[in-house]
Every structure is written in structure tokens, then in C-alpha cells.
Amino acid sequence: MYSMVIVDDNPRDREGVRTALDWSLLEIDIVGSFEDAAEALDRMDELQPHILLTDVDMPIINGIEMTKRLKVSHPEIKVIFMSCHDEFDFVKSAIDLHSYGYILKPIDEEELRSAVEKALEVYQTKRKLEDEKRRLQVERQDMREHFLRTLPQLQEQYIRELLFGAAYEETSIRENLDYLQLQLPESCMTQVILIELPEVSSQHIHVPDTIYFAAYVIKKYLSQSKSDQLTLIPLSTSGTEVAAVVLYKSCGASNLQTAIMDLLVELKEELNKDYQWSVSIGISSASDQIADWAELYRQASEALHAKFYTDDDHIVTYEEIKSSQVIIFDRNFDFAELYKQLRELLAQGDSEQVERFVQELLRSHKLREHEVKHVVFSVIHLLQSILLELQLPLTPVFTGELSLWEELSAHKNLREVHSWLAAKLTAVLEYVNRLRSGSSGPIVERIKQIIGEQYHEHLTIGDIAKHVNYSAIHANNLFKKETGKTIFDYLTEHRMERAKELLRDPQSKVYVVAEQVGYTSKSHFMMSFKKYAGCSPTTYKHQSVLS
């Protein structure tokens, strides 16, 4: 309903207007009828009418003056004038005030209806526009909710297109990924993991006998494995395989690659424990180019399907196979027995037993040169698998710029291969024994020494770990076990204590001290110092000078 107020000093005219039309048919409710403008103006805030029907010629405040005031206080009200006069000045004033009619008395009903409908048309148009706006808002909200409901499927479909080689410009790819809420940092490394789904055995009654359930379980695990450093985007690429795009910052990439391997080993163990499933996994190399995703997928597929192990339960990286087509020889070799021997050797062996093992492996079988290297390479991978099963990082014993295959291929005769394998086995044995004995003191002291020498530089946990040939995670665990503090906490404490010493100098400057203890940001230094010392560097300096 619309509301209307009538103002006229003639009570007969007011009553005549009130009964002139059936206002309910026009959806109008007359909410006020006044004989003078002053009273009407006082009630406008309360009544909030849509239309004002007013006489022009009234004592004290006439209709023209009242309308001028309303244009300031209530500009939305539509005004229709009534008058016994058709003087030019009145008509001109009505036009200037943008009235919706100037009706001469006695009132003609059709002329009144026309003026009122003209005023109502403005409100009706506005209402239609508001209704349309609300409809569009509801429609957009419905579309947005539908988009959010289907977002996982849309994300998976687009990533699948990229992996399968759909041609897009990199700028367009980033825009599409942002729209799909898959924002990538500028310096982002990517690897692709491809997992071959297991055959779900019907003997496990509590598990639905369907390959789709296996895909669901694996994708759910990968989705829940993301962290501040790693983002995993799992998706089904075929009826028998699940892929995952792994994103991480290029800084500390080697440590994160180790974390990826640890994650996959844990995945295999969880699937085996909970469902008795065995899965094979292929891992691509790393790239910082989105345009390389299709190539990374191809690499992961090649690694997955490489016939490198005697069983189907393996993790293979593309880096391991790209230099050669590895062939595993099943004649004269029982790889399950070989795996058992290696486990026993690492559990209770010594250097003499290592030498006997290598002698037996290489000289008791009549193999050609390339066959020997393939067998030795398999032994190395079995060693790596054992270390991963023991949840030990590989980097302390398997490091270097050359890949293992390139390193092994460089040896030209059996004696050199023998020495190389014996050295690798001995290094792994010593590594395992060292960790088993729990002797981490020298490592911790070396870490403290590095911090003492390089605290003033831009020093990261990854940098420190590299100096001691450990992964960042393992080095940190050893340090905390020995000292009760993380490496980061110890580094911060060392820097803060050194900063205190420097700030005691009356000539010292806070920003200079910040740089001297390894901070590139003064604000970061001030925040760290206040958290450590309980006051700002400036306050500490002044207190030191006064004392």
C-alpha cells in the first residue's frame, strides 16, 4: 500500500478529495488530513507519506512554501497541488518544484486520478527495479552457492585438462586457477604424483568391493595431508589411477621433496594397515612452470609403469629412471630374500659382513656388465625403501649432484662397482648405528657452532641442516631432543642476547643492531626483541644507559 496526506484549510475541500475516488483501488491509504501546513510538517516524520495532496493558497504557510521545506527534509515525497487560482506565478512555482500535478478546483476526478497515478508510477517503477535487483541478487547467490557446491569437481576437471595437455596461456591458467580458488604463489614448484589403485578384495567385507572406494580413500588422505609448506590437489585421472599435483615454495625444496616421500611412505603404510592394500606410486621431477604440468604427468606415469621392482608395491621417481631403461632380472635372484638380507645386515651387521654380502652378490652370479649395474641399482633402492620404512631421511647418505644411476654408470669395471656398493652399504650401516645409539651430541654442537658463526647472516633452518647433512625436520628433532629447544628458538635466543650486548653501547642504533644480528627488517627485529626481552630495543637501550 501507498500512503497519502491531504492538506487544505477548507474542510469541505478536504472531505471532497478524501471521498472523490475509491483510493483502495489505487492501493492508497490516506494517513493524514490537515487544515494547515505547520501541523502537516510536524507530522511528516511520523507519517512518512508517499504522496502529498495540498492546497496552494493557505494562511501563514502556503502550499508552495511547505513544499520547498519538504524538498529539503523529505525529498522523496511526491507533491500534487490544488488551487482555485491559475495565476502564472503559482503554476511556475509548481513546475519549478517538480510537482506531479496542478489541479484547479472544483476537483475533476479524472484529472485527480491521472495526477495521482503519475506520482504512483514513479514508486511503482522504483519498486519494480528494486524487485528486479533483489531477484538478480537471489539468482547470483543461487549461482554462487551452486558454484561453491561443485567447486571440487570444477577444480579437478581443470587440473585434469592441464595434466592431459590442454593448451592455455600461462596468464590465462593463473587467472582460471585464481577463479577456482587455487591460488599459486609466484615462486612455486610443482611435482605430479601418480598412484595406481589397488584391486579391492571382496574378502574384506567391511570395505565396498569397488575401485571407486579406493580412489575416494586415497584422495581423502592426500587432501588431509596438506600443510603450510605443501599443498596437494588430488584427482582421478582414469578408472585405475589417482594423481596429485603437489605445490610448494622453491625455498627449501629439497627438504620438502623428502617430506613428500615420507608422506607417500606413510600413505602406503596406512593403506596396508587399514585395508590391506598395496599401491605403486610414480613421482615426477620438479618444475616452476605451469606449462610443464603435462610433461610432469607424463614423467609420473613413466615412473609408475617402469618395471623396476619385482613386485607391484613400489615408489619410483622419474629422476631415478630417466637416464636409463632399467631391467630387473628374475633369473638367479630372489629379491624378497635380498631385501631380508639387507634388513638383517642393517640390524646387526658390521664392515666385514658388508664385504661378504657384496662379494656374494656380485661374484657368485655370471652377469654381464650392464646386468651387474642393474642389480646393484636395485640394491640401492631396496636400501632406500628400508630407510623410509624406518622413517629415516635419505639425504645424510644419498646426497650429491649426480643421480645415483649416473654415479654408478661412471664405474668401468667390476672392482669399481664392488667398491662403490660396499661404500654405500657401509655408510648406510654407520648412519643407522649412529642414530640407533642416540649419539647426537656432536651434531648438536656443530649446529650451535654454525649459529655462533653465522647468526648475523640470513640463516635458515634448511641452511643449518645442510651443513650437518640432515634434513631440516630430522636435524630439528635431534637438536630439540638434546637441548629441549628447536633450532629456530636457539637461533633467536642467540641473536637476542647478542643484540642486548650491542644495545648497551650508548652510540648504538636500533636499525644497525638489527642488521648486525641477522634481521633484514627492523620491525621484525623489534617485534622479536620485545617478545624475548619484554620491552622494546629502545627502552632496553635507555634502561641500560641509566643503569
Image (spheres, rainbow, N blue to C red):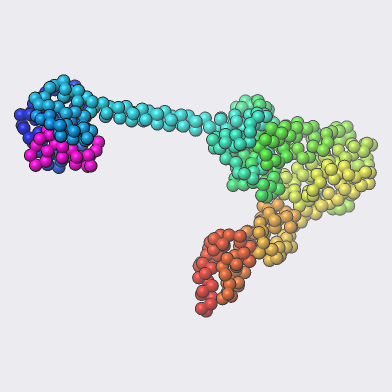
Q: Position of residue 47 (x, y in %)?
A: 18, 37
Picture quarter containing residue 112?
A: top left
Which residue is at the far front?
Answer: 88
Decide if residue 154 is on the left or right side of residue 478. left
Nearer to the camera, 13 or 416: 13
Determine the residue positioned at 50% across, 70% down. 539
Determine the residue positioned at 24% across, 38% down. 75
Which residue is at the far top?
Answer: 110
Q: Is residue 462 above or below residue 192?
A: below
Answer whether residue 452 is visible to the viewer in this image: yes
Q: Where is residue 200 in the image (x, y as percent from the top left)?
A: 66, 28
Quadrant location, the N terminus: top left
Picture quarter containing residue 541?
A: bottom right
Asked if residue 62 is among those painted magenta in the image, a careful observer would answer yes
Nearer to the camera, 389 or 394: 394
| Segment colored magenta | 55-76
Answer whether residue 484 is visible to the viewer in this image: no
Q: In this view, does 184 lie above or below 52?
A: below
Decide if residue 486 is on the left or right side of residue 4. right
